[in-house]
Amino acid sequence: MFEDTHSSTHPPLPPTTEDDRVSWLRLLRSRRVGVATFWRLMAEHGSAQAALEALPDVARSAGVHSYSACPESTALAEMNAARQQGARMLCCGDPLYPPDLAELSDAPPILWLIGDPEVMLRPMVALVGARNASSLGLRMARGLAEGLSDAGYVVSSGLARGIDTAAHLASMPGGTVAVLAGGVDILYPAENTPLAEQIIAYGGARISEQPMGMQPVARHFPTRNRIISGLSQAVVVIEAAAKSGSLITARNALDQGRDVLAVPGHPLDARAGGCNMLIRDGARLVRSVDDVLEALPPMRAARAQPELDLAPPERPAAGPVANPPQENPRPRKSRSLQDVARLHSEILARLGPSPVAEDQLMRDIGAPSAALAPVLTDLELEGRIERQPGGLLALIVSR
């Protein structure tokens, strides 16, 4: 009803009192009020409270009767849930709100953050890619994330399987930001719960624009992707199919005026199709972290962290964490049919037309040689993979 593509200048001042914050949250959570409508109403009425008072008339003029805004009790309940989870509300215009994201016409009016807010003020680069990443893709993601972290950049990604997981793990010591599609307290996929906790322990952050407790659904992921690119000075796509969420992030980045870079891949590997298309259409080709650093503008100094009106949530001290999350679970010692089938699938998912070393594959999967060798032999006999000189393995792709 209300949603449109109207762009307007954001209000110059964020909410300064608790009542103002409640009004902002009520307006944003009101039925049929999205981000664009929020900013339009704020521009037209000057404040969230005034916009809330005008909403019934706005709805009536649009042919909707008996309209009521989000109740104050609902907003207060969400704010209380956030406090219980140690989450902080960042409103657009707050000193701690990510500066690059604030420049967007569709910047989220409110972000919920768990972790260290200071990390949001440092320059970021997004690393995104396939969930069913190959071993070479994961290796590239780790190398880029480590190099960017060493250069002083925060790595942003989406906490998904595959490339996202590898990027967060490798950049965690230097700071990483995970943007969630659901509520900031809902960790998806569940297998990355240990990773999400370690991100906070190492001084990173998790953020979301969705309400506390919101389970992610399909429509949340494209809107989440615009935040990943909006936070960042550049987006690097490592592996992506021709139709994938990573390409949505790349398109968002182009619309937002961000640099888009891509790692090339084998033409017969479907996971490289999107990256190769991006390069064909003008994205910068990435061979190493040096290519990414050359494309970035001179690093800006992070702004000093201002005084906060709320005490920051407690977080564990950084340091070695027991039982770090593994990108893939180790197979059990007994080789049941289920174990073998799972290992077959995992090997095929990791391999592509470009050859990879067998010992690298073993490390990526976390399987001992004794378990991996017979399965590789089976796949070789089935004509699914081929061995190449130098202990290399490659997927056989049907032409």
Image: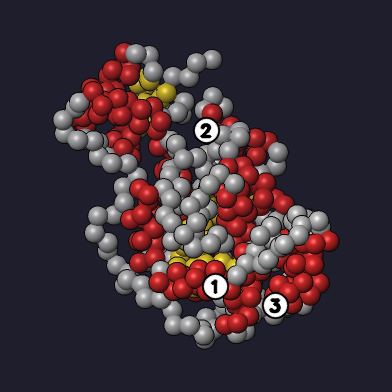
Upstream in the sequence, badge 2 or badge 1? 1
Q: 10 Å neighbourhood of mark 3: few (<14), some, or many (≥20)? A: some
Residue type, mark 1 in image: Ser
Dot 2 falls on a residue whose secondary structure is helix
Residue type, mark 3 in image: Gln
Q: Residue at x 52, y 43 (%)?
A: 129
Dot 3 falls on a residue whose secondary structure is helix
Image: 83 above or below 5: below
Q: What is the number of the mark on residue 89? A: none
Which sits in the foreground, 293 or 186? 186
Residue at the spot of label 1: 73
- Would residue 321 be found to the left or right of residue 260 on screen? left
- Would residue 66 be found to the left or right of residue 266 on screen? right
Q: 10 Å neighbourhood of mark 1: few (<14), some, or many (≥20)? A: few
**CA separation, marks 3 and 2?**
48 Å
Q: Position of residue 269 (x, y in %)?
A: 52, 28
Residue 123 visible to the viewer:
yes
Q: Position of residue 27 (x, y in %)?
A: 66, 69
Q: Position of residue 317 (x, y in %)?
A: 31, 72
Upstream in the sequence, badge 3 or badge 1? 3
Upstream in the sequence, badge 3 or badge 2? 3
Q: Quadrant of the C terminus?
A: top right
Q: Farthest residue toward the front?
A: 66
Residue at the spot of label 2: 271
Image: 122 above or below 309: above
Q: What is the number of the mark on residue 49? A: 3
Dot 1 falls on a residue whose secondary structure is helix
Q: Residue at x 34, y 13 (%)?
A: 382
